[in-house]
């Protein structure tokens, strides 16, 4: 499928999440420009790098959910979930960009009343989004609520479950009031993501767990529909990928980096 065909199909499936994804791409480009214009630093890193990463991630999330929710039998439920995804993610990226403009940390920041309030609001809407994700998982687990079956349904179930489980690493980071284990946040990290190369970094486990939502259905897509063992291959890939995510969580909690140079 060509990029233009993919874009048209996605737009036809869910216009709201399609356009919301593009809003985040525009935000990504704006933050990219500010990255080269504004040399403001937060924890030793350019302040605009974090909103760049989040806007790109949210765009991918919006488009993936836009594709998946099309499989729901109830179009009212599809619209309901879509709006909650947009609202919760709009609040999150809005606060992240606002804090970057102020030269402040967006997450785990309770250094002032305003910073604490913004972090609390962000946490509230992430919680709402988690509930919406759980609802989506429940709907996909009910055959009567979806229009797909077989290996394709198995792949989406596994991806959605992993995405929901990704909230655990988010909770661990909030409990730790930071994403680094064995050192303070900041310091040497790999390019762009800045995942620590010297200590455990829960962001790596969080990233790979969340993006199982894209990788598992994509793996299923790559296997020909007529392949006799497609369901088994999807199941095995899902299990191996899930164990890899668990291992990354363990590694972070042990204070060991996923990548070290």
Image (tube, helix red, strand yellow):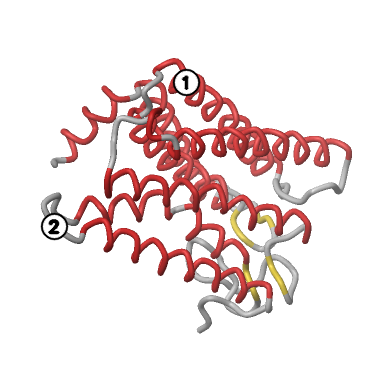
Tag 2 and tag 1, C-beta contact below 8 Å: no
Image quarter where the N terminus lies is top left
Residue 205 x, y percent position in the rendering: 55, 64
Distance Cα–Cα, label 2 vs label 1 = 33 Å
Q: Secondary structure at mark 2?
A: loop
Image side of residue 236 versus residue 250, left or right: left
Q: Residue at x 43, y 27 (%)?
A: 20
Q: Residue at x 35, y 49 (%)?
A: 154
Q: Residue at x 40, y 69 (%)?
A: 240
Residue 77 x, y percent position in the rendering: 47, 20
Q: Nearer the viewer, residue 193 or 216?
A: 216
Q: Nearer the viewer, residue 200 or 45?
A: 200
Residue 80 x, y percent position in the rendering: 51, 20
Image side of residue 79 versus residue 214, left or right: right
User: Which residue is labeled 1 in the image?
Assistant: 77
Label number found at residue 59:
none
User: Which residue is labeled 2 in the image?
Assistant: 227
Foreground label between 2 and 1: 2
Quadrant for residue 181, please give it: bottom right
Residue 12 x, y percent position in the rendering: 26, 22
Task: From this view, report whether residue 66 is shown above or below residue 58.
Answer: above
Q: Residue furthest top?
A: 76
Ranked by sequence position, the earlier of labels 2 and 1 is: 1
Q: Residue at x 62, y 68 (%)?
A: 201
Task: From this view, report whether residue 243 is shown above or below residue 99.
Answer: below
Q: Secondary structure at mark 1?
A: helix
**Label 1: few (<14), some or many (≥20) within 10 Å?**
some
């Amino acid at each position: 499928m060509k990029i233009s065909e993919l874009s048209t199909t996605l737009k036809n499936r869910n216009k709201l999440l399609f356009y919301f994804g593009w809003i985040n791409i525009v935000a990504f480009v704006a933050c990219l420009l500010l990255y080269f214009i504004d040399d403001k630093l937060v924890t030793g890193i350019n302040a605009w790098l974090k909103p760049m990463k989040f806007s790109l991630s949210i765009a991918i999330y919006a488009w993936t959910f836009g594709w998946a929710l099309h499989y729901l039998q109830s179009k009212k439920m599809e619209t309901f979930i879509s709006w909650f995804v947009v609202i919760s993610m709009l609040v999150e990226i809005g606060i992240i960009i606002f804090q970057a403009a102020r030269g402040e940390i967006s997450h785990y920041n309770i250094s002032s009343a305003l910073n604490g309030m913004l972090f609390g609001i962000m946490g509230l809407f992430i919680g709402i989004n988690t509930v919406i994700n759980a609802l989506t998982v429940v709907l996909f687990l009910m055959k009567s609520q979806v229009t797909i079956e077989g290996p394709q349904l198995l792949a989406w179930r596994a991806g959605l479950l992993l995405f929901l489980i990704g909230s655990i690493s988010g909770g661990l980071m909030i409990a730790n009031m930071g994403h680094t284990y064995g050192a303070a946040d900041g310091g040497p990290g790999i390019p762009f993501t800045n995942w620590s190369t010297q200590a455990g970094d829960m962001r790596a486990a969080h990233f790979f767990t969340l993006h199982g939502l894209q990788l598992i259905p994509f793996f299923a897509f790559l296997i020909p529909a007529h392949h006799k063992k497609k369901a088994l291959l999807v199941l095995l890939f899902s299990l191996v990928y899930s164990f890899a995510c668990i291992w990354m969580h363990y590694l972070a909690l042990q204070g060991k980096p996923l990548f070290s140079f």
